[in-house]
Image (cartoon, rainbow, N blue to C red):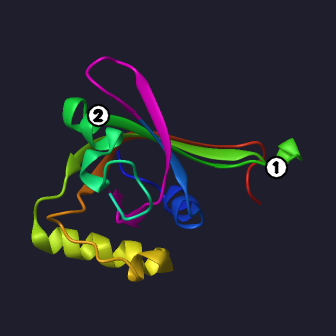
């Protein structure tokens, strides 16, 4: 399901979303996520932020391998509830194996997040995931003028 210009703009205006995955056991797992959008696809990389067992051992990656159906929510929260908004995406996730696609997604992530420019991120050690929307819903407490 293609995103509208408004949904793309909402994604681009936010720096973090919350990714929900489930493993083979059906248990939900939700983590904050840095992402980049290229057309209607979203990408994330297992980066070098501190991790207990390294980027390849992330639970979200194991869950995606077991069940590629994921959800991402990007939201605006405000004490003034008339300003609330969110975009909920249901996506199909899969590892990026193509080196050209990996390089393009990494460039997009580095453009959005200067921290990634300082990290040596390579396909062999830092898996990249592509997420393609199946359906989505953008909600606002009040429509934009």
Q: What's the CA distance linking mark 2 and mark 1?
A: 32 Å
Q: Quadrant of residue 118?
A: bottom left
Under circle 1, the secondary element is: loop
Q: Which residue is located at x 21 percent, y 71 percent? A: 122
Magenta residue check for 36: yes
Q: Secondary structure at mark 2?
A: helix
Quadrant (top left/top right/bottom left/bottom right) for the N terminus: top left
Q: Main secondary structure of the magenta part?
A: strand
What is the number of callouts on the image? 2
Tell me the crowding category of disc 1: few under 14, some 14 to 19, or many 20 or more residues within 10 angstroms, Cα based.
few
Q: Which residues are magenta?
A: 21-45
Nearer the camera: disc 2 or disc 1: 2
Position of 110 with respect to 30 (left or right) is left
Where's residue 51, x and y in %?
Answer: 40, 53
Where does label 1 land, which residue?
Answer: 78
- Relative to 86, residue 7 above or below: below
Q: Which residue is mark 2?
A: 63
């Amino acid at each position: 399901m293609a995103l509208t210009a408004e949904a793309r703009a909402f994604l681009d205006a936010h720096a973090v979303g919350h990714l929900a995955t489930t493993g083979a056991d059906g248990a939900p797992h939700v983590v904050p996520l840095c992402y980049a959008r290229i057309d209607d696809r979203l990408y994330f990389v297992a980066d070098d932020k501190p991790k207990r067992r390294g980027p390849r051992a992330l639970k979200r990656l194991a869950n995606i391998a077991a069940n590629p159906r994921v959800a991402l929510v990007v939201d605006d929260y405000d004490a003034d509830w008339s300003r609330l908004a969110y975009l909920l995406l249901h996506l199909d996730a899969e590892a990026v194996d193509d080196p050209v696609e990996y390089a393009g997604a990494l460039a997009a992530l580095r453009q959005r997040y200067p921290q990634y420019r300082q990290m040596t991120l390579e396909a062999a050690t830092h898996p990249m995931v592509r997420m393609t929307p199946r359906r989505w819903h953008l909600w606002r407490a009040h429509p934009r003028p």
